Image (cartoon, rainbow, N blue to C red):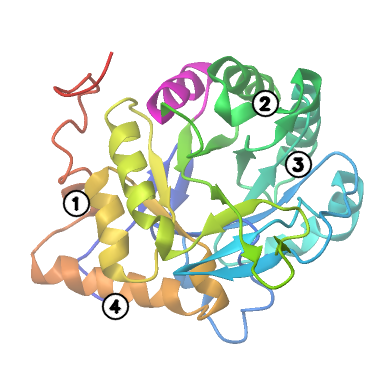
Amino acid sequence: MVSNVDLSVRIGDLDLAFPTMMGSGCYGSGEEFAPFVDLSRLGAIVLKSVTRLPRLGNPTPRLVPAPAGLLNAIGLQNAGIDWYLEQEVAKFAQRPCKVIGSVAGFAVDDYAYVAERLAARDEIHALEVNISCPNVASEGETFACDPSLTARVVRAVRATTGKTLIVKLSPNVTDIAAIAREAQDAGADALAVINTVRGMSIDVNSWKPRLGNVTGGLSGPAIRPIAVLAVYEVARAVTIPIVGQGGIETLSDALEFFLAGASAVAIGTANFTDPRIPIRIVEELEQYMALRELGSLADLIGKGNIGFGTPHQYEGDEG
């Protein structure tokens, strides 16, 4: 460890020792990896999204390999908030890093109900609000794809807790910056940019979709350029911190997100191939900064974004 390099970061009221977060659903609660990875060298673990009622998830197959990535259609499988609070949450107190709960729902009231109950637990340090879910009261329209729906969910969750709220944005929109501004104005403390990109795969022998759900979310290196651009655009539109995510596997990948304007990064799909990648990124980041005589992450964040820190419509924007 390089002693004169400060990798700590503040996201809302959440202080992280390191700027690395483990993506929701990609690291469990850290329990499985504890024998192999020093969890104290992680910034935070984002837990799998939990809903108001139990969900069986989508039909199988749920995972399909894709070029430079992975298609998944898990369908928010979970045992529901009651079981979660009774059986799981107490164990999270043993984690030597921060633990962030992830809330999902299919109506505004669902988000508020789950968020209030989850945030009430001391083992949960912050909440991620996964708005990439269909609103059953609005003909299945995804909350994250509509600025007004985004604002309604964030305001409802904000009213239930003072803990840090990180709103996860979808890339499947025309103007992600507009969604980001609505989330900020409604009370978000930070934004996670981005969630998976919609995609599908067809079996050329059976002539049928490979996923049981037909479509799924594409993650992994294939979406990294999309994610970096989204962070770049969102960082120009808001003043709250951004957690950059999408295809991060190496230090170079993480640096792109920091330079675009992210204050922290979340690592997801890469953990399936090597759960030590987050530790390696931290170690190499310390060395990178020491060699360049950079004292803190603030010396990196947004330095590749010409509009960072002064949100405005830059020349060349439409509208």
Give x and y (percent) for residue 43: 47, 60
- According to the picture, the residue beneath numbered tag 2 turns out to be 157
First of labels 4, 1 by sequence position: 4
Give x and y (percent) for residue 118: 75, 41
Q: How much space separates mark 1 and mark 2, taking CA atoms? A: 32 Å
- According to the picture, the residue beneath numbered tag 3 turns out to be 118
Mark 4 vs mark 1: give the one in front. 1
Q: Are the residues at dot 1 and dot 3 in contact (C-beta closer than 8 Å)? A: no
Residue 296's place in the image compared with 150, above or below, is below
Q: Quadrant of residue 20?
A: bottom left
Residue 271's place in the image compared with 13, above or below, is below
First of labels 1, 3 by sequence position: 3
**Identity of the amino acid at label 3?**
Leu
Mark 4 vs mark 3: give the one in front. 3
Identify which residue is drawn at 47% across, 69% down: 67
**Identity of the amino acid at label 1?**
Leu
Q: Quadrant of residue 128?
A: top right
Q: How much space separates mark 4 and mark 1, taking CA atoms? A: 19 Å
Q: Which SS type dominates the magenta stretch?
A: helix
- Horizontally, residue 207 falls left or right of residue 18, namely right
Q: Are the residues at dot 4 and dot 1 in contact (C-beta closer than 8 Å)? A: no
> Crowding near pointer 3: few (<14 within 10 Å), some, many (20+)?
many
**Identity of the amino acid at label 2?**
Val
> Crowding near pointer 4: few (<14 within 10 Å), some, many (20+)?
few
Q: How much space separates mark 4 and mark 3, taking CA atoms? A: 35 Å
- According to the picture, the residue beneath numbered tag 4 turns out to be 1
Identify which residue is drawn at 53% across, 81% down: 37
Give the magenta range. Answer: 176-188
First of labels 3, 2 by sequence position: 3
- According to the picture, the residue beneath numbered tag 1 turns out to be 300
